[in-house]
Image (cartoon, helix red, strand yellow):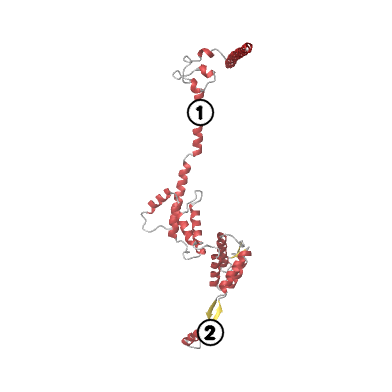
């Protein structure tokens, strides 16, 4: 937790000082590093930190483990650079000597000094800290994705979408690289309109066709918000699709019940005999009762009697087939016995003659 003062330049003022929590970065994804960097710039601006040394010391309070080691490496790399500078004796005598002589002396006797902790080295150190995690060309890829692949979520308000687009644009410079400038309002307007549905884009083009100047981002947000409101009202006025489906199903069920319970007209074909016999619907609706071929077989019988008669007929057929099989088997056995007797008599006659 940290005390920050976002309204006044003096953080000691208790009336405008607030408490705010900031996470400590240990390690993480590129998005985690970007969020942490954004928080650090907020702290440096609103704490406020007047000197460069206080900025470096404050940053270390929000780093730990792997991230702290990376920061210390970046700090040592940036602040240990050697640059040419002037000696103290030469700088003291600058007011007394002529400027031409002083320039010649400094060029002849340059003094090498360390860069140290300055505001410039602090910015350079943060950028180097991010460059170790962010791949090359990330800013260009992010802009390409925003221009080509973003679509408005259905349940998200257009004003919220515009606010998030601005946040994404503000964080592009943190990605570094030659193409890391934030998107201007005209580009954000084009992206926002392209994210909307096709019907909204057509109405937006018709509305802005007669304008002398290019529409601003605020104007586009307000007009798209009105389109969103009107489309929501139109959608709410339409009957729900689920209700329509349910009502249609109810109507179908009613018609089925009506069909099953209706009395058949004289024009419709219907056989009461086949229906009582339990035959399918297509069979007892393709002919009339007087034309039924089974009229004499099942007339005046209940379903139980018809079942008994069908079982009896089945047993009679089985018994008849069994009797026929026995007859054939007995005939074959008689033929075999005759052949055996004839063969034995022939063998006896042969033995007697010999």
* Distance (Cα) linking label 2 and label 1: 104 Å
Q: Is residue 7 above or below residue 246?
A: below
Q: Is residue 205 above or below residue 48?
A: above
Q: Using the rendered view, name the quadrant where residue 28 is placed.
A: bottom right
Dot 2 corresponds to which residue? Answer: 91
Dot 1 corresponds to which residue? Answer: 254
- Callout 2 touching callout 1 (CB < 8 Å): no
Q: Is residue 125 visible?
A: yes
Specify the quadrant that holds the C terminus. Answer: top right
Determine the secondary structure under disc 1. helix
Q: Is residue 7 visible?
A: no
Specify the quadrant that holds the N terminus. Answer: bottom right
Q: Is residue 218 above or below residue 327?
A: below
Q: Nearer the viewer, residue 280 or 148?
A: 280
| Image point (55%, 80%), residue name | 112
| Image point (45%, 46%), residue name | 231
- Label 2 or label 1, whichever comes before in sequence order: 2
Q: Position of residue 40 (x, y in %)?
A: 57, 65
Q: Is residue 171 above or below residue 293?
A: below
Callout count: 2
Q: Position of residue 8 (x, y in %)?
A: 56, 67
Determine the secondary structure under disc 2. helix
Q: Position of residue 280 (x, y in %)?
A: 52, 22
Q: Nearer the viewer, residue 328 or 85?
A: 328
Q: Counting other residues with Cα less than 10 Å from the Cα at mark 2, is it few (<14), some (14-19), or many (20 or more)?
A: few
Q: Position of residue 330 (x, y in %)?
A: 60, 13
């Amino acid at each position: 937790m940290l005390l920050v003062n976002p309204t006044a330049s003096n953080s000691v003022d208790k009336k405008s000082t607030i408490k705010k929590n900031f996470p400590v970065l240990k390690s993480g994804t590129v998005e985690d590093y970007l969020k942490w960097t954004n928080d650090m710039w907020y702290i440096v601006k609103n704490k406020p930190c007047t000197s460069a040394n206080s900025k470096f010391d404050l940053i270390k309070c929000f780093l730990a483990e792997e991230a702290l080691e990376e920061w210390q490496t970046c700090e040592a790399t940036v602040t240990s650079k050697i640059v040419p500078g002037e000696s103290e004796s030469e700088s003291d005598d600058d007011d007394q000597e002529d400027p031409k002589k002083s320039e010649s002396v400094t060029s002849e006797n340059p003094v090498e000094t360390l860069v140290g902790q300055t505001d410039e080295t602090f910015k350079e150190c943060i950028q180097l800290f991010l460059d170790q995690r962010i791949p090359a060309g990330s800013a260009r890829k992010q802009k390409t994705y925003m221009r080509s692949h973003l679509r408005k979520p259905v349940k998200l308000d257009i004003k919220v979408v515009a606010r998030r687009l601005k946040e994404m644009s503000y964080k592009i410079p943190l990605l570094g690289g030659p193409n890391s400038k934030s998107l201007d309002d005209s580009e954000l307007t084009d992206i926002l309109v392209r994210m909307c549905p096709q019907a909204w884009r057509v109405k937006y083009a018709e509305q802005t066709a007669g304008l002398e100047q290019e529409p601003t981002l605020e104007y586009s947000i307000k007009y798209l918000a009105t389109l969103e409101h009107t489309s929501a009202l139109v959608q709410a006025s339409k009957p729900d699709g689920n209700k329509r489906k349910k009502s249609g199903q109810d109507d179908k069920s009613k018609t089925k019940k009506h069909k099953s319970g209706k009395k058949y007209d004289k024009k419709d074909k219907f056989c009461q005999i086949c229906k009582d016999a339990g035959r399918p619907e297509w069979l007892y609706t393709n002919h009339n009762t007087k034309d039924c071929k089974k009229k004499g077989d099942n007339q005046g019988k209940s379903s139980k009697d018809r079942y008994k008669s069908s079982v009896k007929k089945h047993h009679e057929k089985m018994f008849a087939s069994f009797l026929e099989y026995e007859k054939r088997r007995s005939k074959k056995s008689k033929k075999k016995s005759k052949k055996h007797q004839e063969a034995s008599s022939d063998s006896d006659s042969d033995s007697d003659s010999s």
